[in-house]
Image: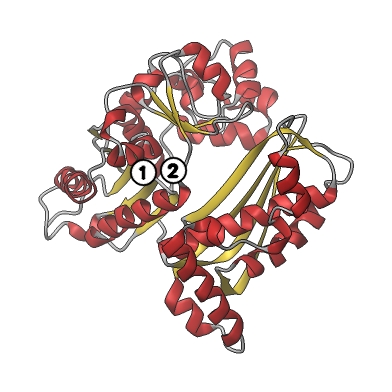
């Protein structure tokens, strides 16, 4: 039987956080919804298509989103639930092919070339995957089908919402060249201004531009990268990465943080939230990442990977504290902090690999059991627990 001419799928869940929230609250269906921080400086993490019609977008301040869409419903994110649903979605994809490259919690590339003996075309495979996700999880997804990763991802974007698009082998340039140049990977606002100065508006314009002209404005590396994409050249293979997903928590603060003790306490609080979400999802992870956004909106990240997987608050905090030292935060106001644990593995199996910590693991598992029964706030680290003064202060009628 002949090989599939378009063996690569890009599966992208539509408005993933919003659609997960709608599973638990049908009242959110059909109305403008955003998932994001509800405080004065919160940002939109995901917006429904009803909200997008008003101009609401991811990473937009919630206040601006409400101004654009007065009827907007804003829901606080529940990352543990998203991780659980994501795990189910990835399991469904891996039930079709083991070659799944997760690139975020809600999207992945799949190599379905090995399914040519079982399905007549990759189009049928994609349709079956979408149906399985809809039937088993209740969520919409969009799928792009192509001969390369770049074209497959572009196709899934143009299939949204809740659609399917195949770019037949040999028609890639016909699909690409009419599109706006901003759709090329690597074209941000600065590069767009440079291309505008050259009169380049579409991807086809990039393909037709002399390489020397592009290099004079963009530099050799960027020029060659964009030219390759504009000619649909993308030799990358789909690489199985079982640990591509992560569990995270972050907080945007009402006022900038400057005191190191407060910064450490808030980081520890995030580590504890991530630990609780890992426990609910039954996973552990080999990598810990710290995200810091400063008052001037500059954002940095620091990460560390260990051979032994981490899942409990203390282990995550030990790594996060060293990452804070590496972030060189002294003297800079902090607007946002985030903690993520990635390279996920099964939590029960992970505990069996870590020897010599039986008493600590037993204590951590007891905490997990209490939280599962009484909620995540039932047990918290002493350092982030309210002090007597805090409780008395909050109870005063003039506060």
**Foreground: 235 or 278?**
278
Q: Is residue 396 left or right of residue 222?
A: right
Where's residue 311, x and y in %?
Answer: 55, 68
370 lies above or below 377: below
The residue depicted at 88 percent of the width and 46 percent of the height is 330
The answer to whether the residues at label 2 and label 1 have Cβ atoms under 8 Å apart is yes
Quarter holding residue 40: top right
Which residue is denoted by mark 2 in the rendering? 234
> The residue tagged with tag 2: helix, strand or loop?
loop
Q: In this view, does 291 lie to the left or right of 48?
A: right
Tag of residue 148: 1
Q: Is residue 241 visible?
A: no
The residue depicted at 46 percent of the width and 20 percent of the height is 56
Total number of numbered discs in the rendering = 2
**Foreground: 275 or 285?**
275
> The residue tagged with tag 1: helix, strand or loop?
loop
Q: Which quadrant of the rendered structure holds the C terminus? A: top right
The residue depicted at 83 percent of the width and 41 percent of the height is 258
327 lies above or below 143: below
The tag earlier along the polypeptide, 2 or 1, is 1
């Amino acid at each position: 039987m002949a090989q599939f001419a378009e063996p690569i799928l890009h599966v992208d869940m539509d408005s993933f956080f919003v659609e997960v929230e709608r599973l638990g609250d049908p009242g959110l269906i059909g109305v403008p919804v955003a998932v994001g921080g509800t405080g004065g400086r919160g940002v939109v993490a995901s917006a429904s298509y009803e909200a997008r019609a008003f101009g609401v977008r991811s990473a937009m301040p919630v206040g601006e989103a409400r101004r654009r869409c007065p009827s907007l419903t804003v829901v606080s994110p529940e990352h543990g639930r998203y991780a659980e649903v994501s795990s189910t979605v990835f399991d469904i994809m891996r039930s079709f092919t083991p070659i799944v490259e997760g690139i975020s919690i809600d999207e992945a590339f799949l190599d379905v070339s090995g399914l040519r003996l079982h399905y007549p075309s990759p189009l049928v495979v994609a349709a079956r995957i979408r149906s399985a996700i809809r039937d088993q999880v209740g969520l919409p997804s969009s799928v792009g089908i192509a001969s390369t990763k770049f074209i497959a991802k572009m196709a899934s974007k143009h299939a949204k919402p809740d659609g399917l698009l195949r770019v037949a082998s040999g028609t890639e340039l016909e699909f690409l060249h009419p599109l706006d140049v901003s759709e090329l990977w690597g074209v941000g606002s600065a590069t767009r201004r440079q291309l505008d100065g050259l009169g380049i508006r579409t991807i086809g314009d990039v393909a037709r531009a002399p390489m020397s002209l592009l290099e004079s404005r963009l530099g050799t590396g960027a020029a060659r990268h964009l030219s390759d994409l504009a000619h649909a050249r993308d030799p990358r293979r789909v690489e199985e990465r079982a640990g591509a997903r992560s569990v995270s928590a972050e907080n945007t603060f009402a006022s900038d943080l400057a005191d190191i003790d407060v910064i450490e306490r808030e980081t520890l609080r995030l580590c504890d939230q991530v630990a609780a979400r890992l426990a609910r999802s039954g996973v552990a992870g080999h990598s810990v990442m710290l995200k810091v956004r400063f008052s001037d909106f500059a954002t940095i990240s620091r990460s560390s990977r260990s051979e032994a997987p981490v899942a409990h608050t203390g282990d995550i905090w030990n790594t996060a504290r060293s990452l804070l030292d590496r972030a060189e935060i002294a003297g800079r106001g902090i607007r946002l902090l985030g903690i993520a644990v990635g390279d996920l593995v099964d939590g029960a199996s992970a505990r069996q690999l870590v020897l010599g910590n039986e008493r600590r693991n037993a204590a951590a598992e007891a905490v997990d059991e209490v939280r599962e029964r009484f909620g995540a706030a039932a047990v918290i680290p002493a350092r982030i627990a309210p002090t007597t003064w805090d409780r008395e202060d909050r109870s005063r009628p003039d506060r």
